[in-house]
Image (tube, rainbow, N blue to C red):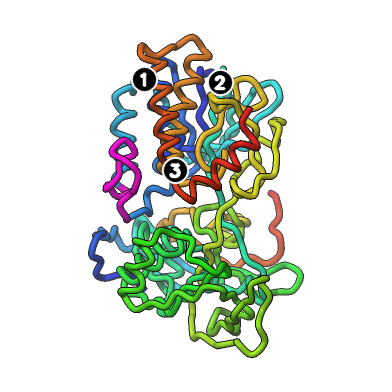
Amino acid sequence: MKMTEIAIVGGGPAGLSAAVSAAASGARVTLIERDDHLGGQLKKQTHMFFGSKKQYASTRGVDIADILQEQLAKYKDRVEIMTDATVIGIYEDGILTIEQNNKYIKMQPQRIVVATGASEKFLTFPNNDMPGIYGAGAVQTLMNVYGVKPGNNVLMVGAGNIGLIVSYQLMQAGVTVKAIIDAAPRIGGYLVHASKIRRMGIPILTSHTVKYAHGKDSLEKVTICKLDEKFQPIPGTEQDIEADVMCISVGLSPLAELLWQIGCKMTFVPELGGHVPLRNGEMETSLKGIYIAGDVAGIEEASSAMVEGRLAGLCAAKGLGYEAENYEDLRKDCLEQLNSLRSGPVGEKILKGLSKVTA
Amino acid sequence: MRIEEHPILSFKKGEKIKFSFDGEEYEGFEGDTIASALHAAGVKVLGHSHNHNRPRGFYCAIGNCSSCLMTVDGEPNVRTCTEKLKSGMVVETQKGKGVLK
């Protein structure tokens, strides 16, 4: 049995940040990541972040992953990093099981921070299972991490920030984006992204959805149609778009399997992307010693995931008796950063969601 | 199709790697996953659904969705979107659900 003080599940922005603040407080930390590198989805984020300096605004996501790893390296005497290691279970007695290089490892931590992130949602339409139809994040990974074009002509479904940003990145990679469509009557993403897209000549069609995907072995053509104010298709408004790639960017849902397994109290909160755990102001779930941070706690941006990670790491360490010297200031600073990130119209929705799960 | 020019990113291609897919020789680069190498070579269909035999490609590319499972070096149900490509790998379209050895 492997022992550690704080096990952190997931090495993305939330998990890395939790590891930094927990280790800075003095705790021994084991960071467990299923991929072969840390940074999670920051690795494919070639755009500059918003927010404030504290959340690395104006820095590209891919560089933020390196910055966080440098911060963590300062505490390497008490931080263990496990990559290619998948947590496959967390049990009632607090034992965590891990698969790494075909070995089954059991670990007994005193505190656990679950920062497993999210997965991309899917959309229902005929032939939605056809190759050529990918999550927008998948296409971003393919392009920005592996340097491979997804195809030649793309239809982007979803005009939220991810849809807009990935469309821009597709154009940067030399791929044509035929159109961006969204079922909502308004563009969900930031105006600054949408304007950039429009300047490139890509139409953004709101109140539109996918009616049908065509192709033999992979996507060749998409029929889209207009929706009325009740989101019902308007007959006669169908149009065909020649596309060999369709990107689905209709939101994310929290990857909360481990929290379900161990028995955290969960509730369905549409504003946060699906089933999320109840938590207190310290990011601790209904189960003592099990903390959460990032998208698994509710879908937001990487900026807030990093701050939640800091907070969870800080509080988990304090729970073990490792109280950071300026604990109260640090904690307040995290809360203030989260408040400021959650101001504005998108933040309103998040806050409404959080009010349903925060004790 | 590989990205040749990019305004922000520079892709350092690793060593060329040869592997086989359904008996034919393919090439990828060190750093590729199996799925990225296949996609770059124009292969989008990675498998077929069990009941209706519908073609399947990857969907999430980060190991969540299980849409990219293939048989690799005789082992079934390998998530090819995250499994790194290695020289001499034998990649096959999987028939059926795979058998535990």
Describe residue A264's horizontal placement relative to residue B6 as left or right: right
Where is residue A284 drawn, in percent x and y?
58, 25
How far apart, in angstroms, are the residues tagged by discs 3 and 2?
31 Å
How far apart, in angstroms, are the residues tagged by discs 1 and 3?
29 Å
Describe residue A63's horizontal placement relative to residue A237 as left or right: left
Residue denoted by label 2: A111
Where is residue B51 drawn, in percent x and y?
76, 70
For badge 2, the amino acid type reads: Arg
Q: Which residue lies furthest to the top in this view?
A: A321
Label 1 in the same subunit as label 3: yes
Q: Give the range drawn in magenta.
A: A47-62
Q: What element carries label 3?
A: loop
The front one of A42 and B68 is A42
* Mark closer to the chain start, 2 or 1: 1
Could you say which quadrant of the image residue B32 lies in?
A: bottom left
Name the residue located 43 percent from the left edge and 80 percent from the top edge. A178
* Mark closer to the chain start, 1 or 3: 1
Q: Do the residues labelled 3 and 2 touch (CB within 8 Å)?
A: no
For badge 1, the amino acid type reads: Ala
Q: In this view, does B80 lie above or below B21?
A: above
- Mark 3 against mark 2, which lies toward the viewer? 3
Q: Which of the labelled discs sits on residue A343, or is there none?
A: 3
For badge 3, the amino acid type reads: Ser
Q: Which of the labelled discs sits on residue A24, or is there none?
A: 1
How far apart, in angstroms, are the residues tagged by discs 2 and 1?
16 Å
Label 3 in the same subunit as label 2: yes
What chain does badge 3 belong to? Answer: A
Label 2 in the same subunit as label 1: yes
Quarter of the rendering occupied by the N terminus of chain A: top right
